[in-house]
Image: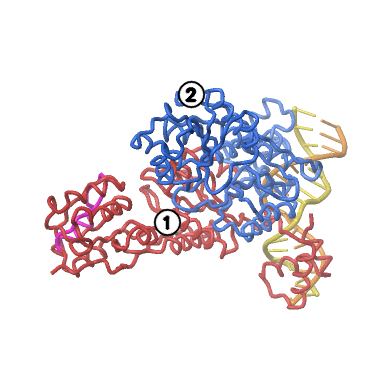
Chain colours: A blue, B red, C yellow, D orange
Amino acid sequence: MTTRADIARLAGVSESTVSYALSGKRPISDAVKKRVLAAVEQAGYKSNYAAAALAGGSPRMVTMMISNLFATPASRINGALVDGIVDGVRAAGFHSVIWPVSNDDESDVDLLLRSNFSGGVILMNVKEKDERLRLLNRAKVPFVVLGRTKVDFEYNFVDRDFQSVDKIALTKLKDLGHENIGIILSDSPIPAHLKRAAASLKMKLELLDVPNTLDGGALLAVHFKKSHPTISGIISFLDAATIGFVNAAADCGLSIPREVSIIGVNMLESQAESAHQAISTVAFDAYEMAKSCGKMMVEAIEAGKNSKKKRSELWVGDFVDRGSTAVKN
Amino acid sequence: MTTRADIARLAGVSESTVSYALSGKRPISDAVKKRVLAAVEQAGYKSNYAAAALAGGSPRMVTMMISNLFATPASRINGALVDGIVDGVRAAGFHSVIWPVSNDDESDVDLLLRSNFSGGVILMNVKEKDERLRLLNRAKVPFVVLGRTKVDFEYNFVDRDFQSVDKIALTKLKDLGHENIGIILSDSPIPAHLKRAAASLKMKLELLDVPNTLDGGALLAVHFKKSHPTISGIISFLDAATIGFVNAAADCGLSIPREVSIIGVNMLESQAESAHQAISTVAFDAYEMAKSCGKMMVEAIEAGKNSKKKRSELWVGDFVDRGSTAVKN
DNA sequence: CTGTTAGCGCTTTCAG
DNA sequence: CTGAAAGCGCTAACAG
């Protein structure tokens, strides 16, 4: 095991100079720095993470907790999100790992907190009611949620601004002349803010409640023209169902987008793109959002106990037309 | 931050006693242990991972590197494997995390090694030619591969014993009276060891080369009776294609398993089970295998530089008949 | 710009 | 069975 003492000897400088040459936390002459780096290279020196963490106060490491990491074949973890976090966090000289959670019961969080090797945790895919938030908060570990959920205290988060996104979609359809809009959703009512927006735009919304599966969407397509003759625009919150709908449409004598224009508001850009050219989206850059989340995490760690103030960040997307929204005349 | 010094004071014992009471590495009277644990509870004490790692030699932590972690929608990471490793490693008092790798280029490994916060690494989903192995080996970080690949040095690994598995399947079919066997594979020839086994059992093998998709399998079913009239047993190395085949069989006037018995050798038990009752398997317990891999990892870390001897472990499965292999008469 | 030094919190001898 | 004390390798004052 080579330590920074060995490097110091090799380079003929003091130990702290080695540290500073490596961290850049104080000015070092180029000559010395070069000698140090050469010595590091020659000795194959690797910094000891544990020692740095111990001396430095808090470990320079963030942990991602992704719920349902391995649930069912196509787990919904998104590579872009993880990549973004990794990069955002790395930019600050931190590392990031994924904490493997099978069942997201409390013992997983508990173990993480008890082990205490992580400077902060990023919670992803939070559910409506997520006990982990409460635990994290009580343990006073810095944490950021990528997404949001309902709890009775303030916390750091980064999330899409769904309300604005929805409104953009609605407004776009209005501009194109559509007034009767179908809302593809699964097992839930039309969001209040959408209703409000529709009212003020004098548009009519109709709930299209289908299971979020290819078949669910396909089934909707079959009877669509008969059961919803007036609908000419659709805002969809579902990915699979929408793709199923679009795929089946032609066979059902339904022309997209000539007869119906669809805007997806809850799918990733890449998903819509690869899935079907007929789905426009209010796109946003998941990678960039996650990266910003990583940065926020590091800030929260470095702020430490000093500032208690919580931060939050909302991301709005831009409308992306793939030539698949038709004017209603 | 409460430290073990606080606990010592609270419990009225020395610092080392607290450590030993917690680790159990030396006998402590019940009375003292109780006092210590009570103090820990009361103060909400959490051990400092970094300090423990620093003082204890190597960090009690293993890192999983899963290549293609986020490749394409249905990433092939298997929950059972990760769960098994986590549990196997945890049993030894170690923790485990997943190192997020997007593109498995060298920089990912390099970063991991340079950061040096992990006592050992488990490589999963290794590819035919995997540079990471070489890097790990050169860096002298203890590592275990879950799977195998080709390199010019010895290393620790845990893997299925495919040859034995294949032979079990073949022998089973022989016992049932089948002599003409189809081998479902994608884009590759029949393995040599299978050919040899078949020869010694006086069985005939025929390659059924199809893409590993539901459609691929279905297509095979369509012409099956005409193009392969003599085949009465099948050994399949593919999952999706086999399921497609079985699903389509009835419609094609092919009765499974009355006319053809199928044994899957490359699918997880759960997969075959949920997919179709008509597929028998040579089953193996992925979870247990991975757990054993986790244990091996910890052993390797603890062995440290002492013993250089490599270990390896091969797992064989058992034949599982779901009442779906028919005797050929 | 560079060197000295006091810890960070824990594990582990070495002494009872 | 329990205590005292010496580090693990690094960071961050404090002193030039």
B205 vs B129, nearest the viewer: B205
The reply to whether residue B246 is in sight is: yes
User: Percent from the top left, x then y, of residue B13?
Assistant: 81, 70
Q: Is residue A106 above or below residue A317?
A: below
Query: In the image, what residue type sits under mark 2?
Result: Lys
A22 vs B164, nearest the viewer: B164
The span picked out in magenta is B179-199
Q: For the residues marked 1 and 2, what is the alpha-carbon distance in whole angstroms?
A: 63 Å
Q: Is residue B212 above or below residue B272?
A: above
Query: In the image, what residue type sits under mark 1?
Result: Phe
Q: Mark 1: give few (<14), some (14-19) or many (20+) Cα within 10 Å.
A: many
Chain of the residue where label 1 is placed in the rendered structure = B
Q: Residue at left 20%, top 53%?
A: B252
Mark closer to the observer (1, 2): 2
Q: Residue at left 38%, top 36%?
A: A249
User: Percent from the top left, x then y, of residue A214?
Assistant: 41, 44
Q: Mark 2: give few (<14), some (14-19) or many (20+) Cα within 10 Å.
A: some
Considering the numbered disc 2 on the image, is that residue within a helix, a strand or a loop? loop
Mark seen at residue B157: 1
B144 vs A275, nearest the viewer: A275
Instruction: Tell me, yes or no, whether the highlighted magenta stretch contains residue B196.
Output: yes
Q: Residue at left 42%, top 61%?
A: B286
The reply to whether residue B109 is in sight is: no
Chain of the residue where label 2 is placed in the rendered structure = A
What residue is disc 2 on?
A328
Q: Is residue A283 above or below residue B260?
A: above
Residue D5 horizontal side relative to residue A177, left or right:
right
User: Percent from the top left, x then y, of residue B205?
Assistant: 16, 56
Q: Residue at left 51%, top 31%?
A: A281
User: Percent from the top left, x then y, of residue A102?
Assistant: 54, 57
Considering the numbered disc 1 on the image, is that residue within a helix, a strand or a loop? strand
